Image: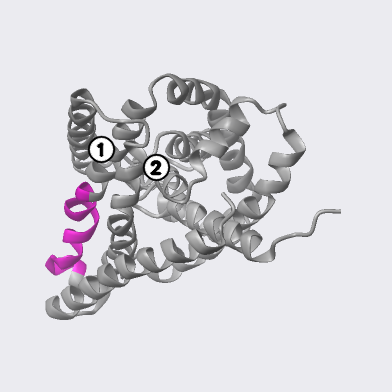
Amino acid sequence: MQTIDWKDWLLRLFKGAAVGIGGILPGLSGGVLAVIFGLYDKILNFLGNITKDFWKNVIYFIPVGIGGVIGIILFSVVVEKAFGNYQAMFTCLFIGFVVGTLPQLFKQAGKQGRQGIDFIILGLSALAIFFLMILGGQSLTAVEPSFLAWLFSGALIGLGVIVPGMSPSNFLIYFGLYDKMAAGISSINLGVIIPLTLGLAICVLSLAKVANWAFDQFYSKMYHFILGTVIGSSLAIFPTVVFPAFTATGLAASGLSFTTTLVFSALMFILGVMFSYWFSGIESKYSQD
């Protein structure tokens, strides 16, 4: 019987938790963190060819799945309790984490070589996701919670796994469903969790094979597209999520001064960057990926 490498198992648990948090954190994407942690290709290969090495893949993804559930539930509690008032600071922490891993993602994108068209794709995808998120942030639409609304929300979260850079939580905020989703998950409301899970599973399973084929055929172009969406979505977070916290309304909600909010946001950003470098060292030392 094969001995379990607990360091590697716990590392995958942590990765799963981070991906789960990314799936519900405004401005981020679970898919982005899956790419950064080297899980994205494995997820697509598994879901796109689900019968191939089925049990081996199931065993590999058990800690990832457990971590994902833990990350979603715990962070939903954090969102419900504190995130509304200190959104800018929490977001800056995760943006710092993403920024710190951009060199790794750029290296991965060029693993099979680069062409001029790859940089054009990178630039266009960055601009597209940036303006999509900016325009979306200016057109809030209230949607009443319902089974179909939560099914749709789950599909959006699944799309964020398949299309790195897309932040489903931002769209859920735009639709007025985000805080209700977080409250439903933190209170283990099955009326919210079941349709969310169902929508996510339908979306991921139906699109994984297509995405897997695209990466096989157009590896460099797909990864430069992803890199562009990561950059564009990260930049768009500032005017849509961070900057509103510095307005009179945002400062009144947090109970902090402009200077305090600025200093803490900057510190969280720096901590995020530092953590990403530290984690990269841990991953290279212990990961068997």
Locate residue 232: give its quadrant: top left
x and y percent of residue 212 in the render?
50, 25
Q: Which mark is residue 211?
A: none
The answer to whether one can see residue 12 in this image is yes
Disc marking residue 228? 1
Q: What kind of secondary structure does the magenta stretch mostly adopt? A: helix
66 drawn magenta: no
Q: Is residue 118 above or below residue 230?
A: above
Q: CA distance from mark 1 to mark 2?
A: 17 Å
Local crowd size for mark 1, using a 10 Å CA cut-off: few (<14), some (14–19), many (≥20): many
Dot 2: what SS?
helix
Could you tell me residue 46's position as x and y percent?
62, 33
Can you give x and y, in whole percent of width and height, for residue 284 in the image? 48, 59
- Name the residue nearer the viewer: 112 or 12: 112
Q: Is residue 213 left or right of residue 227?
A: right
Residue sitting nearer the eye, 21 or 176: 21
Q: Please name the colour scheme applied to the rendered image.
A: one colour
Pick whichever of labels 1 and 2 is earlier in the sequence.
2
In the image, what residue occupies the spot 24% across and 51% down? 237
> Callout 2: 10 Å neighbours few (<14), some, many (20+)?
many
For the residues labelled 1 and 2, say whether their Cβ atoms are less than 8 Å apart: no
Magenta residues? 235-250
Going by the numbered disc 1, the residue's amino acid type is Gly
Image location (x, y in percent) of residue 106: 29, 44
Query: In the image, is 262 to the left or to the right of 287?
Result: left
Residue designated by label 2 = 168
